[in-house]
Image (tube, grey):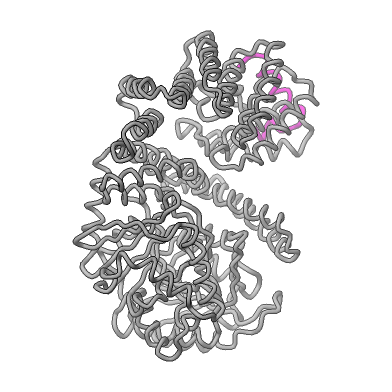
Amino acid sequence: MTAQDQDELMADLLRVGLDGALAAVALKKESISAIGIGAPVLVLPPSVLMSGLQGGGFSEELLTEGLRQAVAALRRVEPTAVLAENLLSLARASAGGEAPERRLGMVVEAITVLRRVGQPHRLPRAYVALSNVLGEMGRLYDALAAIDRAANAERDYSDAGALLAIHFGRATIFRGLGLQTESLSELRHADRALSAIGPEASDKLWAKRIRSETMFCLSELGRVEAALAEADAWSATDPEESLFTPAVMRADLVSRRSGAAAAAEDYLQAAIRATEEISTYSSARFRRKARDRYDSLFARSVNALIEARQHASAFVVWELAKSGSVLLPRDSEAYESALSAGVRDEIAAEASRLVGYARDALATGDRLALAECQDQGDWILFRNDMLGRIPQARAASRELVDAQIADLRRAVTPGTLLVSYAAIGEHVYVFAVTSESLICARLATPRLELRLLAMSAARECRDLLPTDALDESARRLLAPVGHLIDEATAIVVVPCAELQSMPFHAMHPFRGKAVTYSTRAMDLRAGMSCGERPLTATSSWTGLGTQSVAYSPLPELSYVREELQAIGAHFRSPNIVLDPGATSRDLLNGTAHNDILHIACHAAFEPGAPHLSRLLLEDRPVFAFEMALAPLNATHVVLSACETADAAAHQGGHTQSLASAFITAGASGVTGSLWPVNDRATARFLTTLYEHRINTGASMADALGRTRSVFAEETSHPHYWAPFVHIGALGADR
């Protein structure tokens, strides 16, 4: 920290009266890698500062959490240079978790503040940040104009760090414009600027950036052998590090020279290293964004392995591509520390405020307001994820893949079939795993057409239409594995995002079978091998019921009472909350353990803002984001309500729904509905389901299959007998 930086920042904090609420911290040089180029001075809340010091450093996620809080506090007072610096740092740190459009707004606000408070010597780096975000958005000519403004400002103030970033930024823009020769020239200037700064711990980061960009330019100029030699030399230079860039570059170059199959092993290593980076994040938000960055790499890797006929490895890489969706365990000590520091109370207060905003947004139907509430809910869950979640780092090795293949094969018991769909490029592949074999086949129908079929099949079931699309989907999706389905008694379906809405269990070949849905095959390894605990009369069961609510015009659910009483009669000590109706406190603050928590009420799925999907309880709606925050103490949850299993699906196994919220809260499985359900029919269906479970000792998936068969004999349309599905648990990787 320079004396000028220190004096200016402390003067700002004293002037606006926030010197006690925020603390200025000079980062170690190696910490700068988390935020890119920028002043090595940040202003953070003391709690975040302590977390960084105790944890040995500031990750992107921790910096993002602290900077968001600091910026919110600084915005409430007069504009200052410290606000501008924090905005720039937030724009850099949150690249892995925030949309470029929002980060662009942060940078523009920072530039405006710096001009207003008379701090022009800070503008060169601000214009570099502006150029970087514009480049991410594909606005390359605007990015070039911003980098030129940065260069003009740097000449007035001689900022060596900014000069390095200017040359590097211009190089990346030139490459994006197809000017690789000019890009190489700028990279040489950047290398000289780096040498002029002097040896520092953070130099290694910039050296890697320059080297990486140089390889890309050589490759795009057709100098494949030179680029390949550079990739090999880089890997040899740092043999102990898991270097992602040379690994993926080598894979792409070998593929270009000799075909995808020849590059299979290189792509496998690159995919494992991408998985390593995804698994370093604690929050689902950052892991989801990281997965999106590597989508093309995972697709190329799976395609190359399939072409090389390494089907088992291709399947595991597809599973690794979903590693970001796994629910991480908590460090109990870190979690208790956060509780004692009041952080959990802060998150609860944030969630409470969002409940009010969400209800207002739903009342007006304002799409922008709903999108804002969705984003706020995601950030609240981000803060909750940061409370002691333990990233699960992976070793970059071929042994990891081989071990997972062996682990999965041991877990899939005789009679069980695992069917997983992978969307790669324009095509969809199906993997089928049994206790004896693993097969892979490319479906003849293109990816987009299958997505449209899934939407049509779901609509047919939902709206009582003829099931032509469902029947056609079965023919196209199941043809390569039909003989295995016939032989199986239990089936685990892992759909890709495009097939998330497809009701596989309603297809004729699946009828009467135990069907479980999951987003990752690896999450079910333990469950498939050890089975599900039988349900008996001594099992603990709680039924929460709300028949009608004053704040909604929806009709009364007149069969809720009959449903809860009939099901509760199967247990020795049922706990039924119905008169008066169950409230948000009954759901969110329950402490007693339950083998099954059964909830019967109205519900609504919000496809454009799935965190706002909700259960309508007596006092108010309970939103999905609230449920995901709650300390649920139930093994299995049954949601007797409309659309509770309908979900918004993202690549990489990420889904957002009421069912997924309960799994995030701690449930090992959820039974929910894919479409609106009839009150009376639901009461009959679920009562029969419990009878099958208790009388036969069947698992939830098996009992669902038997119950569907009974009701399918009464009426042929799946609208009546196939709304409910069993969703398997998401667990921490082992």
- Vertical order, 102 against 653 (above or below): above
- Is residue 5 highlighted in magenta? yes
Q: Residue at x 59, y 70 (%)?
A: 615
- Vertical order, 642 against 119 (above or below): below
- Residue 90 percent coordinates (x, y): 62, 34
Whether residue 337 is visible, yes or no, is: no
Left or right: 401, with 546 as reference point: left
- Residue 578 percent coordinates (x, y): 56, 82
- Residue 446 percent coordinates (x, y): 44, 57
Left or right: 450, with 193 as reference point: left
- Is residue 35 highlighted in magenta? no
Left or right: 462, with 244 as reference point: right
Q: Residue at x 45, y 82 (%)?
A: 721
Considering depth in this image, is 190 or 17 the residue closer to the camera?
Answer: 190
Q: The magenta stretch spans which residues? A: 1-23
Q: Residue furthest bottom?
A: 714
- Residue 94 percent coordinates (x, y): 57, 38
Considering depth in this image, is 107 or 442 the residue closer to the camera?
Answer: 442
